[in-house]
Amino acid sequence: MRMFIEKSVLSKIRTELLVLPFSEEDVKKISKKAHKYREITDSVKSGDFTGESGKSVLLRNIDGKKRILLAGMGKEKEIDQEGIRKACAHSLKVAKSLKLKSLSVLCEGFGKISGPKAAKSIVEGIILGNYEFDKYKQEDRKKKKDVEEFTVYYNEPDMSEVRKVAKETRTVCENTNWVRDMVNEGGDVIHPDRIARIAEGLAGKSRLKIKILDEKQLRKMGMELLLAVGDGSRYDTKMIVLEWNGSKAKEKVALVGKGITFDTGGLYVKPSPYMDDMRCDKAGALTVLGIMKTVSELNLKRNVVGIMPLAENMIGPKSFKPGSVIKSYSGKTVQIVDTDAEGRLILADAVTYAEKDMKADTIIDMATLTGSCVISFGEYVAAMLSNDDDLAKKLFDSGEETNERVWRMPAYKEYADEMKGDIADLKNVGYRRGRNAGTITAGMFIKSFIECKKWAHIDIAGTAWYEKPMGYQPKDATGFGVRLITEFLK
Ligand code: BES
Ligand code: ZN
Ligand code: ZN
């Protein structure tokens, strides 16, 4: 999508559709002292437009603007970045339904939020709101027209900061859409080898260093947990490591993402209909891939390594079995109780690799790990576990800024104790087959494979995948985590 950031004022703008945001206070002023456009005053006086948040009114042919969309932003002191994102996504949808090629937003009327912060939210609302996974809807595609460009009009003395933020935000949002596209594809399109080739393509075009570990190498290294999970699949298991060295400082952050390209549950097969959406189970790894792309495109002054263990959890003569004991890369043995608790197994080997081989100081893992997380938090918040208050606070703050929110759960020793094995060092589910504190015990299982003093685990089972569209989020893959972690790294 083409983007323009222009300096202008209302009277000079010529466009197909201009979005004009108004707070309820702005509307009250118009009812007392008329707006310079009679049509706007009429809409206010007739009660059609009140400025109520989420409500809008479309007007036609005013002063060189073919259409004006009055966008209600609610009470001035309640206007936040999320409100701006939603209003802009709504406006984009109006433009789309009118089959327009472009839209414009005048950056006024957003209460206290102005300048770069407003620019960021506008760009997010429009680019994220424009996303649709419709490539397989052949009839619909023919009828539809895409909005091709948008302009944000400002009247700021210095536009350079606004332009810089808008450009960066566009990169982050386009990469979020890129992640959404890959997560939405089925497991036979986006399988481990395909992801490896996409990552290779990315590394070829950037200063990212890449290492692809295949089954032979993984076996030699002793990544038996990761390999076991992929045993039943016709696709080879892989692990991808992407490295970004953006700083001379020693500090290194490892991002580790669960990449189960399809989760049938294995021999502990998922009952219907719980398998239907399990193409989502690669979201963690693809989010890490999207973040690495973003980090390289924004040229971030940080050292970041992205680690993606990739396997398909299938059923077949070679599938790994309940009751087996498997030796992890760390050397600890794991008793398999439930083959559907596979994510923690592949992550265990991957976080060990982050610590032992990559020597990361901070490890953040992301995974669609537990159904319990969806039950606790729904789609609105991701669960977080961490052993470091400062890291947890920074992730929380990044979540509030981006609205990709995380909420910390208790990480007491008792939860880790539940994961002690009967015939091995560990077992892969806690009490009542992992139903007691399922999200916490899953996270504590991962933690038991590393010594790392700065670790955070983010369970994105609810936030990575939506039942229904909401605001600028589409149905299905949301790309959750790209904005959160980019903000955190910045
Ligand atoms: N991939 C699932 C978790 C999941 C559930 C993600 C719903 C997205 C939406 C994971 O591998 C799984 O099956 N977890 C089990 C763990 C249990 C066996 C301890 C679960 O949550 O039921
Ligand atoms: Zn599973
Ligand atoms: Zn899974």
Image: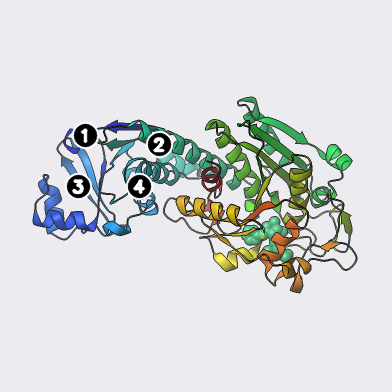
In the image shown, does 32 or 15 lie closer to the viewer?
A: 32
For the residue marked with disc 3, what is the amino acid? Leu
Q: Please state which of the two labelled residues, at mark 2 or mark 4, is closer to the viewer.
A: 2
Q: Please state which of the two labelled residues, at mark 3 or mark 2, is closer to the viewer.
A: 2
In the image shown, does 446 or 257 lie closer to the viewer?
A: 446
Q: Is residue 335 left or right of residue 155?
A: right
**How many marks can you see?**
4
Q: Is residue 341 visible?
A: no
Q: Tell me which numbered mark, 1 or 3, is placed earlier along the sequence.
A: 1
Mark 3 near mark 2, Cβ–Cβ under 8 Å? no
Task: Quickly name the residue at label 3.
Answer: 59
Q: Is residue 391 left or right of residue 14?
A: right
Task: Quickly name the residue at label 1.
Answer: 13
Image quadrant in which you'd find residue 287: top right
Q: Quadrant of the N terminus?
A: top left
Ligand 3 sits in which quadrant? bottom right
For the residue marked with disc 1, what is the amino acid? Ile
Instruction: Give the alpha-carbon distance from disc 1 to disc 2, as whole Å.
Output: 20 Å
